[in-house]
Amino acid sequence: MSGSGTKRLSRGALIRQRAKARFVGRRAQLALFTENLSKDPFSEEAPADFLFHVRGVGGVGKSTLLRQWQEAARRTDAVTAVVDENDVHGVQQALVELARQLAEQAGPCKEFDKAVEQYRREQATQADPMPVEGEASVSSRVVTQAALGAASLIPGAGVVTAMANPDTAAQGLDRIRAASRTRAQRRGSQGDETSMSRAFVSELDRLCRRQRWVVLFFDTWEQTAQYLDEWLLRLLDEEFGRVPANVIVVLAGRDELSERKWAPLRDQVADVPLEVFTEAETRSLLTSRGVTDMGVVEAVLQLSMGLPLLVDLLALARPRTSEDVDADGNLADMAVERFAQWITDSEKREAVRVCALPLQLNEDVFTAAAGPGPEGLWEWLCGQPFVSGRGDYKHYHAVVRASMIRQQRAHSPQGWASAHLRLAVTHATWRAEVEERLPDTKRWQDAEWARHHLDETYHRLCAHPGTYLTAALEQVVHAAGQGTAVLRQWIETLEQAAQDATDTTLHTWTGRLRDTLISDDPALTCLGVLLSHSRLSPESRSWAHTYRGTRLYLGDRDEEALTEFDRAITHNARNAHAWARRGGTHRWLDRYDQAITDLTTALDIDPTNTWALYQRGATLQQTDHYDQAITDLTATLELDPTHTWALATRGQTHRTAGRYDQAITDLTAALELDPTHSWALGQRGEAHRQAGRHDQAITDLTAALELDPTYSWALATRGEAHRQAGRYDQAITDLTAALELDPTYSWALGQRGEAHRQAGRYDQAITDLTATLELDPTHTWALATRGQVHQQVGRYDQAITDLTATLELDPTHTWALAMRCQTHRQAGHHGKARTDIARAADTRPEDSSCTFEKLVLETVEGRLEAFSEQWRQLLTSPASPPDAAHTSFMNLFLALLIEPENRVPEATEALLATHPGNGEIDDLVSYLVELSVLTGGVGERARQCHDLIMWRASS
């Protein structure tokens, strides 16, 4: 068989080979880049250039030169990628396209792919009020135990705290924790591409360890710079991480770089201005195309003025005489027209004309535009000098396309409209096919659906701009609801339609829409402009107000958001999304009844609205309706098993209800879906902490902080885990770091005060607790704890003052009552102590802290024998969750009071083996001092225990 001994080239390789063979001129520029590639990228004596800027007018050959540079780079085994205006409507699209091309050559970019998925999840939930630790949902009994340190507090008042009924402090703790979280944290990441950029730089570093060069090309910089200029400067400034020395960046555009922005790097830019061809280069190109007639050459020289694109087009027209090169009219139009006229094959000529209509071409679009043609026609078109592109899609050079568009519109307006309508119907059909396999909620995130929808709208506007203007603007409403990148893409497409159709009304509208892109919130501003269009349908107006309300909500303008949602519902009372978003806003404002009402209405309209279902579940969780919350969150997961927030929030609900194993199961499942879910990691760490598994808690919280070093809640909670494990210095380090991130984080401030108290640093504890009360004067837990500190150092009057103030704020605060009872008793005011303990017993008779203080009072007053059975029942009750420190404390009191055969020295050593802090030791000693004055065995054993502790402390 012919050619059987040679390597068979692909069609794409043949096209590239032919394009290379046609490349004439620019030898100096090609040599410049090739020589740069031959240098040592890490040389300090003769460093290679890393930043090139190719510039020149349209048609001068910038894109062609970039293709040659890319081929040169690949011949040195470099990995390359290129993006232009067809790929870029924001940083995210550019990075995805660059990474896609790099992966094709060098294997998967796994870290970047994970970052993209995370970014997309954040974008998808951007408008979703995320559950955040520290809300009222964390006001449950279990969280109160966590904040008070129930799992680790041992002797004395510490044990009182540990045994306190958790409901007593819940309300104050909720205020502390809720106030500690900023609104931006509470509502989640806005997806600013930073993490994705860091992952991209990490992939560059990985590739650069294996490749000599990685070259990134950015074409049509005059258009893409508006999205990428600032990002690229940040990249080169290494804001996203170290950029390897063997990365080369090439920019190509019509304009010079911004003097102001690029001034710091001006000396590093290798400027490559492209001028029109010299006469010698023009003659060389014409000769390579077989144009040798002297008259024709002279005519082309005069007409083309050396612009490479026009020289190439005129050459490809195969003129025989100088008369064939007519200089009348627009230069580009003439060159394009002559090129088309001199295509002798009618099918090729028609394909060139009609394929100028689509914005982008692949073989399917080509067939829809040109019809079924002879074999090889698509490949022939792709080989033309004015056709470029990568991957599946190609596009015409802007100069050529604009000329062909003008000619077709002027030559046959009816044919122009009919051709565009045929393409619109084709894209509508393809869009409908995608919709058959895609849920409504996923359409705008699907690239294929979005492309067909956009192209369909473009072609309808080109055919009949007046007829389809309102329908197009109604789609822009939804585009604005998807974010700035999608909105920008739609506005640019409408601009292209206005330019191609030369419609003044459409042009005016696109100008107004374009102006919104420079505002602080383009989507919000754009929606306001769109609402000024009198022909918008009520449904579209409802959506516009819904999207505006969402943007205002994200901007912390809640009352304005509610107004927008009200307007949305007025225009369309069946808009489930508006009801749901209004419910979500009420939830954030702690108007839970209104939230539940709105969310239920949304679900009555659309039972499959997972956002509303999830929000109602989260609201029910915040109001401590755990079983109902679980029902809604489970229903959410039945509709969408990949809803990580529903899984994580159901885990949080189990945690707040004290079902730690179920919590960890759900949170682990959420992390299997999204290993970068820092909130789920934090919640799982909190579940471990509350279950008494401090090391596992610290592991998870540390992992959450590795994902997000600014996660102040995780820092504070890890500090809490250290505190409960008796590692007070590490606790204080973490809590201090959390406060550096958020100085108003009152919960962290209070917990640092508690850590100081437990470590025996009472003055520092008072300072922190006082600062907490300055942030929230009504915070009962901080007030009561400050009273406890005063009691521990013997300032009984000040302790009584703080504890009394606590009870004035919350008369049902049983722990404060128990603490004041202890303080009165130790101050010798047994009558007042008995009054307090009786009041506490009436308020909450099951409260173990009150029982403990009541029994101590009875014992120091000489009635141990009468209450010995109650003592036994209390001291032998198991701790929940199990805790060695709590158990050892109870066993010591059992030896002191009830079972003297359990020798006190062994029980004391067992307790000290749990490494109690100085504060806990002081608490225990205060009880021992009270018991030491008793006569008989109890007093002797208390003194023995006291002496052992003092001896250990002194040694």
Image (cartoon, rainbow, N blue to C red):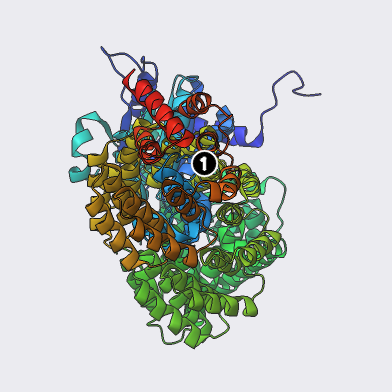
Quarter in which the N terminus is drawn: top right
Occupied quadrant, residue 740: top left
The x, y position of residue 641, in whole percent, is 68, 55
| Res. 840 in view | yes
The one of 292 and 700 positioned closer to us in this rendering? 700
Residue 320 shown left or right of residue 55 in the figure:
right
Residue shown at 50%/46% (left/top)?
864
Quarter in which the C terminus is drawn: top left
Q: Which residue is mark 1?
A: 689
Residue shown at 77%/24% (left/top)?
2
Instruction: Identify residue type, mark 1.
Output: Arg
The one of 756 and 374 positioned closer to us in this rendering? 756
Occupied quadrant, residue 590: bottom left
The one of 429 and 659 positioned closer to us in this rendering? 659
Residue 611 shown left or right of residue 166 in the figure:
right
Q: Residue furthest front?
A: 936
The x, y position of residue 210, in whole percent, is 50, 19
The one of 550 and 540 positioned closer to us in this rendering? 550
Q: Mark 1, residues whose alpha carbon is within 10 Å: few (<14), some, or many (≥20)?
A: many
Residue shown at 31%/38% (left/top)?
756
| Res. 68 in view | no
Occupied quadrant, residue 723: top left
User: Is 125 placed above or below 945 here?
Assistant: below
